[in-house]
Amino acid sequence: MGMKRHELTDDQWALLSEFFPPRPPQPGGQWKDDRLMLNGILWRLNTGAAWRDLPERFGPWQTVYDRFSALRESGLLDRIVERLQLKLNEAGFIDPELFCVDGTNVRAARAAAGAAKKKSPAL
């Protein structure tokens, strides 16, 4: 199977694989491969597609979504992003004077989105 768009290369997986130690086999369900799940998550985040539109090669979309939710809730996703930012910074790819995340949010009035305007009550 060739490398597909939005999937981790072997070098990229080597950088992240320590976050996903091997698990001993357990009776019952089968744990899906961490690299496959991460590739599914990255595909979804890169494309902006709905979870239900995830290609079948990643397995059931619900499984990938559940793994994504677990990574977020456990804080592991934050630790992975921090590690990647550290590596980029060490390589000189992040300019600390330009690097920032703007979390502001500005809501427009409903009318700005095409909603009907409120009519003033008749006097």
Image (cartoon, rainbow, N blue to C red):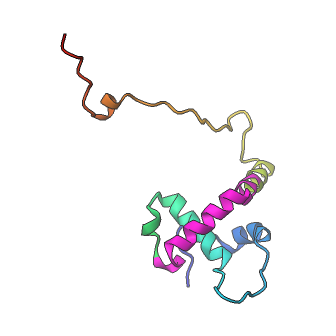
Left/right placement of residue 39 relative to residue 20 reads: left
**Depth order, front residue of 62/2:** 62
The answer to whether one can see residue 92 in this image is yes
Residue appearing at x 47%, y 57% in the figure? 48
Q: Residue 21's spot in the image, x, y percent? A: 79, 75
Please identify the dominant SS of the magenta region.
Answer: helix
Asked where in the image residue 19 lies, by quadrant, the reply is bottom right
In this view, which residue lies farthest toward the left? 122
Residue appearing at x 59%, y 70% in the figure? 39
In this view, which residue lies farthest toward the front? 123
In this rendering, the answer to whether 74 lies above or below 2 is above
- Image quarter where the N terminus lies is bottom right
Q: Residue 70's spot in the image, x, y percent? A: 66, 64
Residue appearing at x 72%, y 54% in the figure? 78
Q: Residue 31's spot in the image, x, y percent? A: 66, 81
**Depth order, front residue of 63/59:** 63
In this view, which residue lies farthest toward the top? 123
Asked where in the image residue 69 lies, by quadrant, the reply is bottom right
In this rendering, the answer to whether 25 lies above or below 65 is below
Q: Residue 94's spot in the image, x, y percent? A: 72, 44
Q: Is residue 122 magenta?
A: no
Q: Which residues are magenta?
A: 56-82
- Image quarter where the C terminus lies is top left
Left/right placement of residue 92 relative to residue 105 reads: right
In this rendering, the answer to whether 16 lies above or below 31 is above
In this rendering, the answer to whether 101 lies above or below 111 is below
